[in-house]
Image (spheres, helix red, strand yellow):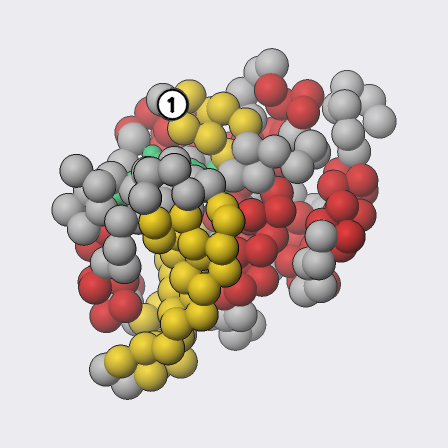
Amino acid sequence: MGILDTSREEMIQLLRERGITDEQVLRSMNTVPRERFIPEPFDKRAYEDSALPIGRGQTISQPYTVAFMTQALQAPAGGKVLEIGTGSGYQAAVLAEMGFRVFSIEREPELLSFARRKIDSLGYRIATKGGDGTVGWSEYAPYSAIVVTAGAPGIPDPLLDQLEDGGRLVIPVGNLDVQTIMICTRRGDSHETEEVVGFKFVPLIGKKGWK
Ligand code: SAM
């Protein structure tokens, strides 16, 4: 097990027990070294199923949440995926490892530069930018899928607008204490929504987010 309190294989086993069935997601999470995205001393706990501090009052999401949201995206092979909330860079790396073309936005410059260093040192090709992700990244739209990794007060319209037809937006929506993960599939000018309850995220702050 080395210096890690729980091993990567144990994490994958736990994700299977909690109902993650997408083998591509499990394979990717079994490949990306989560400990490299977590500052000391919390890196030792990288394969526990918990969110951990990454600085600036933010967290790397819990492995189950990453797996659940990634599985919910159902993006086609090689599709373009936009992530809002790069944080540590781990979720973006999991998506890149699955072969998607990944674009990711983070509002905290310090976190973005930490993530950029990790992404580059592991050799992933991911486009990142600093700024408010609630307005999306129109330059590269449309996307096959968009994942928002912070809790929003509502669904930002620009994100729905930047999805291709049939594309999916996976976003936690709720109050500042508890959120529901909304899975929105774009159908022409409207969208279908499915809801999954009981997740907890840090707030999405921005023009179309919390002030
Ligand atoms: N995906 C991240 C990972 O793998 O480590 C988890 C990130 S954390 C749960 C959510 C991130 O969203 C934080 O880093 C926070 O700064 C960022 N965030 C909040 N509001 C944002 C916004 N409007 N645009 C971009 N990033 C935002």
* Number of marks drawn: 1
Viewer-side residue, 139 vs 132: 132
Q: Nearer the viewer, residue 117 or 62?
A: 62
- Farthest right residue in view: 1
Quadrant of the image containing the N terminus: top right
Q: Residue at x 66, y 48 (%)?
A: 29
x and y, in percent, of residue 164 in the image:
33, 76
Q: Residue at x 23, y 82 (%)?
A: 189
> Would you say 193 lies left or right of 26 here?
left
* Residue 63 higher or lower than 147, as above or below: above
Q: Is residue 102 among the parts visible in the rendering? A: no
Q: Secondary structure at mark 1?
A: loop
* Residue beneath the point at 60% across and 20% down: 42
The residue lying at 36 percent from left, 45 percent from top is: 151
In this rendering, the answer to whether 147 lies above or below 122 is below
Image quarter in which the C terminus is found: top left
Amino acid type, mark 1: Gly
Determine which residue is flagged by label 1.
57
Which of the pair 166/105 is nearer the observer?
A: 166
- Locate residue 41 relative to residue 114 in the image: left or right: right
Q: Is residue 37 left or right of residue 135?
A: right
Quadrant of the image where one finds ligand 1? top left
Instruction: Give how far across and how far down residue 90 sits, in percent.
Output: 53, 41
- State the image coordinates of residue 128 (x, y, percent, origin top left): 35, 45
Depicted 140 relative to depicted 93: above or below:
below
Locate residue 144: give its quadrant: bottom left
Crowd band around label 1 with a 10 angstrom C-alpha radius: few (<14), some (14–19), many (20+): few
Q: Nearer the viewer, residue 175 or 83?
A: 175
